[in-house]
Image: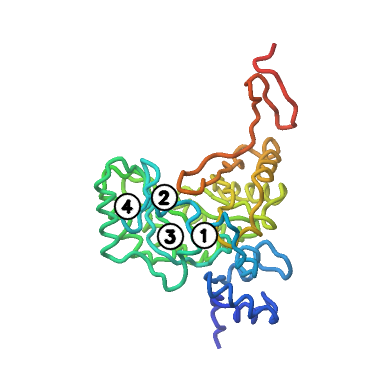
Amino acid sequence: MTAARPITLRDVEALCERALVPHQRLAELAEVAARYAVAITPAMADLIDRGDDPIARQFVPDARELDVEPQERGDPIGDNAFAPVEGIVHRYPDRVLLKVVNACAVYCRFCFRREMVGPGRGGLSAKALAVAFDYIRAQPQIWEVILTGGDPLILSARRLKAMVAQLAGIAHVKVIRVHTRVPVVAPERVSAALTRALRAPDKATFVVLHANHPRELTKEARSACARFIDAGIPLLSQSVLLRGVNDDAETLGALMCALVECRIKPYYLHHADLAPGTAHLRTTIAEGQALMRALRGRYSGLCQPAYVLDIPGGYGKSPIGPNYLSEDGAMVEDFNGKRHRYPPS
């Protein structure tokens, strides 16, 4: 008899059956799940230890998600103000986001689009997708298109291939970037057909992997990432600085080293956005800057991401890492905290 195939856990009752939440918390967590989507893939569920686990903190609902602070907002980075047509966000001159789907393989408890994603939300209709491609064609300054959502890699290879083919036919689009969690949370989805679907003649394709803790880079996840890289698709990473997940130098450094060992260049470390009900997961900027100081000089330059903040209101990303130069520009600080005059006297 064939063993039952593991399934994604999509409600708090399923989490309780897996002993990921206690039975006495079902009612309060059901209220959270009614507001914000829940999905934990088998790959992630298998990683969760009992107690205050860094993987659990990312995916298991928490009653504190119902506590919304005054500064939190449903569209924390201001996507809506830069949406000329459905599915497009055109904030920066030379690139656009193309939000092709509003669902994910997993739902992160800190997601900045948590008010917009979930099962049954679907994606762009054929008509809306055609309008989005027409917009890109009509804007010759668009050099890069970023496929996002939701997670575009939950779509079939056939649908992704069709989208990439549309972009391949637009001469001024030179770069296609894909933002995804899939290689980590559902590595079995990264098939040869999927990697082929993302490649286009005369276009540079990049995959940006979202990973927040070194334990996420399992043997299966590393193999999935290697399938992209070996197919000629470079990988970058983006991580979110999260309290109780990666907010200590040892864990953050181990994550960046593990990524580089997988041939993935750390790209961004995001300061957590002001999404509703996420205060318990956010650090302060000062804490993030201290962590970046701890990484500098102690880990290879390959392991140094840019620490960035997406300014609320749609003003874009700004680097917020520590400053090593004095205000008058006469002194510079080394990685040991010692200050030196420059140029030397």
* Disc 1 residue type (three-letter): Arg
Determine crowd level at label 1: few under 14, some 14-19, many 20+ residues with C-alpha closer than 10 A. Answer: many
Marks 1 and 4 sit apart, C-alpha to C-alpha, by 27 Å
The residue at 60%/68% (across/down) is: 66
Marks 2 and 3 sit apart, C-alpha to C-alpha, by 12 Å
Looking at the rendered image, the quarter that the C terminus falls into is top right
Identify the residue under disc 1: 181
* Disc 3 residue type (three-letter): Gly
Which numbered disc, 1 or 4, marks the residue that appears first in the sequence?
A: 4
Q: Position of residue 289 (x, y in %)?
A: 66, 41
Identify the residue under disc 3: 149
Which of the pair 88/173 is nearer the observer?
88
Which numbered disc, 4 or 3, marks the residue that appears first in the sequence?
A: 4
Marks 2 and 1 sit apart, C-alpha to C-alpha, by 14 Å
Which of the pair 270/77 is nearer the observer?
77
Marks 4 and 3 sit apart, C-alpha to C-alpha, by 16 Å
Marks 3 and 1 sit apart, C-alpha to C-alpha, by 11 Å
* Disc 4 residue type (three-letter): Pro
Report which quarter residue 51 is drawn in: bottom right
Which numbered disc, 3 or 1, marks the residue that appears first in the sequence?
A: 3
In the rendered image, the vertical position of residue 113 relative to residue 234, given as above or below: below
Q: Which marked residue is nearer to the observer: mark 4 or mark 3?
A: 4
In the rendered image, the vertical position of residue 121 relative to residue 327, given as above or below: below
Identify the residue under disc 4: 84
Which numbered disc, 2 or 4, marks the residue that appears first in the sequence?
A: 4
Q: Are marks 1 and 4 in contact (CB under 8 Å)?
A: no
